[in-house]
Image (spheres, rainbow, N blue to C red):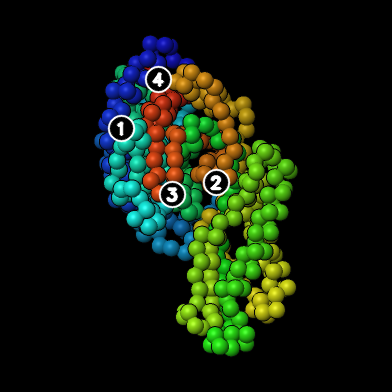
Amino acid sequence: MPDQTTIDRILAAVDELFDEQIAFTQALVRFPSVRGAEHTAQDFIHDAMRARGLAMDRWTVDVEAIRHHPGFSPVAVSYENAINVVGTFRPDRQTGRSLILNGHMDVVPTGPLEHWTAPPFEPRIADGWLYGRGSADMKAGLAANLFAFDAIRRAGFRPAAPIYFQSVVEEECTGNGALACLVRGYQADAALIPEPEDDKLVRANTGVLWFKVRVEGRPTHTRVMGEGANAIDAAYRVIAALRELEARWNDERREHRHFEDLAHPINLNIGRIEGGDWASSVPAWCTFEARIAIYPGITAEAAAEEIRACIRQAASGDAFLGNHPPAIEFHGFFAEGYVLPEGTEAEATLARSFATVHSRSLESFVTPGYLDARVFMLYADTPCLVYGPVSEDIHGYDERVSLDSVRRVTKTIALFIADWCGLSRP
């Protein structure tokens, strides 16, 4: 850890730059960077990195370049605007350890706009919170990465090791953006991702699978509906079977370290459903799309086969589905979970920085959601620290991030850079 004078100068520099940092975060939020529309926001952060003198790399994610990697998630959408941005800082002479500072630019859809207090892409500040879609998940973290670096330079220092600032796409749906950075050759001694994790460190994280199920029915007029087969009703019977699978996987939590005390670590979400053509016709078709978590150590393919078997069994016991089995397609997340081992030097360094800023010990916890850290942990043998600000209602209405927490996180990242990478005078 640097000496106290250096620490004080870096922390003061974060405070001096904080108004500018929040304005920068608000500018990021104004870009509606939902899937397929991230490119303008990526242009903005590219220019911001280039203005800091970083060596820039910007490219469109190439599915063929990553398709055969074990961490690849299958996609059925265009990647025309799926653009990654990496800015690299290289010291004149390296004496410290290299670092990746990663964050994702993509955000989830807003849902019905009338339920937002204010338009989701018009950021506003109220009562110490910054509101807007993506404010917490995770544009505040992307800004914190850059402004932690700015604070070190404002304090009169430079990092003494390479730092790779990654702004990636596809975190909310496949993880292929972070994977594309790895395949392109970006590796370091540690990685840090300031996701909105309530000032805590993620110890373990589930994997995630997305899949689509299509059920075919037999259409008839409703006056003789008993002669038909309602595809929507049949789909609900398939969903009921998947709920039983979900319950069984949750009952197995005691077999998986770090998940024993979670009440419901495996969550099945039916995220979309549609079917039928006419209210007075027995529906001929129904599709639903689902997301389910899996424990670390379970391969995506093994989990997928359990899902297939569950649906096959449900169909075989159904008078209609037995002869008309549902079709299953895995698309989007096909990602495995990870556990951050205790005792790494990267975690110890973050804990020191955290304690200096927060005056308390760093807590770790388990989260049953997807994180890009799995790319570093599973495929690059790189400790990845997921730690970030306090938030509320991510993926919901009136998403918001605590500004006090963002300030503390930025200070912690800045001290982590100083300790992990080392410092030099320019």
Who comes first in sequence, dot 1 or dot 4? 1
Q: Label 4 amino acid?
A: Leu
Mark 1 burial class by Cα count in 10 Å: few <14, some 14-19, many 20+: many
Which residue corresponds to mark 4?
423
Which residue corresponds to mark 1?
21
* Camera-side residue of 304 and 112: 112
Who comes first in sequence, dot 1 or dot 2? 1
Res 3 → quadrant: top left
Element under disc 3: loop
Q: CA distance from mark 4 to mark 3?
A: 40 Å
Name above or below for residue 168 compared with residue 189.
Answer: below
Q: Position of residue 99 (x, y in %)?
A: 46, 32
Q: Label 1 amino acid?
A: Gln
Q: Label 3 amino acid?
A: Gly
Residue drawn at (73%, 43%) of the image? 255
Between circles 3 and 1, the one closer to the viewer is: 3
Q: CA distance from mark 1 to mark 2?
A: 28 Å
Between circles 4 and 3, the one closer to the viewer is: 3
The dot on residue 369 is: 2
Which residue corresponds to mark 3?
396
Element under disc 4: strand
Q: CA distance from mark 4 to mark 2?
A: 35 Å
> Quick check: marks 4 and 2 in contact, CB under 8 Å?
no
